[in-house]
Structures are given as structure tokens and as C-alpha cells.
Amino acid sequence: MEEFRDPADKAFVTDEVTAIIKETIESTVQNNPYHHQKVGQWNTNIVEQCLKKLSGLNKPYKYITTCLIMQKNGAGLHCANSCYWDVQSDGSATYKFESKTMYVIVNVFGVSI
């Protein structure tokens, strides 16, 4: 593992992670309408691409990524998560994408190693 000169170099930067999530969702889903048979591939692509880009940051973290894709049809959705970790070094980011036909919600958790 590389040595970091500045503690900020190894920090979990929520805005940086959120930008990666947003870019990945938008490049995967684009302007496509919800299509049940494509959701599995979109889901896989989003989590794999997010992890690839996050690992490319070369920061000392283990990443956990979740992705939910739901058809927009008026149904309710409630979800929550909770973490017991070191708030000084660990972090999380969530991004919600919404189109006319679907919601995509991605969570990334970064646990310092």
C-alpha cells in the first residue's frame, strides 16, 4: 500500500464517491425506460463499475456497494441502514437517480483498512 503524505489523501470523500456513483448510473441506465429483463444486467454493471472506479482511487478502504433498481409505479419504498464504525475514518455515500419510469438507489460504504 502506498504511503500517504497528507491525511486528506486517504480520507473518504463523500462528494468524490457520490460523483462516481452518479456517473456510473447515468452511463449505465442512460435515458432507457425501465425494462424488467435489463434490470439484472444494469444492477450488476452499476455495482461492478462503482467498485472498479473506487478501487482506482487507491485509498486504504474496503468498499461495500449496494444497488436497488425499482420500477416507478406508485408503490412505496422504505429502507434504512446503520453502521457501527469509526466516524473519523470510515464513511458512506448514497445517490438516488430518478427517471420517469424508475428509481435507482446506490449506497457505498467505505471501511478504512
Image: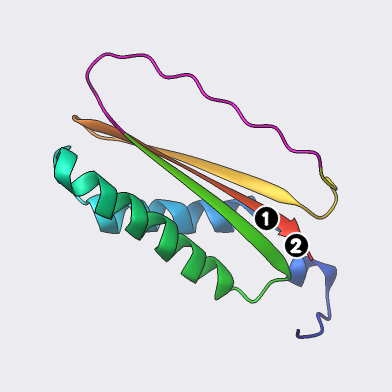
Can you identify the residue that label 1 sits on?
110
Closer to the chain start, of discs 1 and 2, is: 2
The magenta stretch is 70-84
Which numbered marker is on residue 102?
A: none
Which numbered marker is on residue 11?
A: 2
Disc 1 on helix, strand or loop?
strand
Is 42 left, or right, of 37 in this rendering? Answer: right
Q: How crowded is mark 1: few (under 14 residues within 10 Å), some or many (20 or more)?
A: many
Q: Position of residue 10 (x, y in %)?
A: 75, 69
Q: Position of residue 82 (x, y in %)?
A: 70, 32
Which residue does the image show at 70% across and 65% down from the upper left? 61
Q: Where is residue 49 in the image (x, y as percent from the top left)?
A: 41, 64
Q: How many marks?
A: 2
The quadrant of the picture occupied by the C terminus is bottom right
Is 23 left, or right, of 33 in this rendering? Answer: right
Vertical order, 62 against 42 (above or below):
below
The amino acid at mark 1 is Gly
Magenta residues: mostly which secondary structure?
loop
Question: Residue 59, can we see it?
Answer: yes
Q: Quadrant of residue 104?
A: top left
Q: Is residue 41 magenta?
A: no
Disc 2 on helix, strand or loop?
loop
Nearest to viewer (mark 1 / mark 2): 1
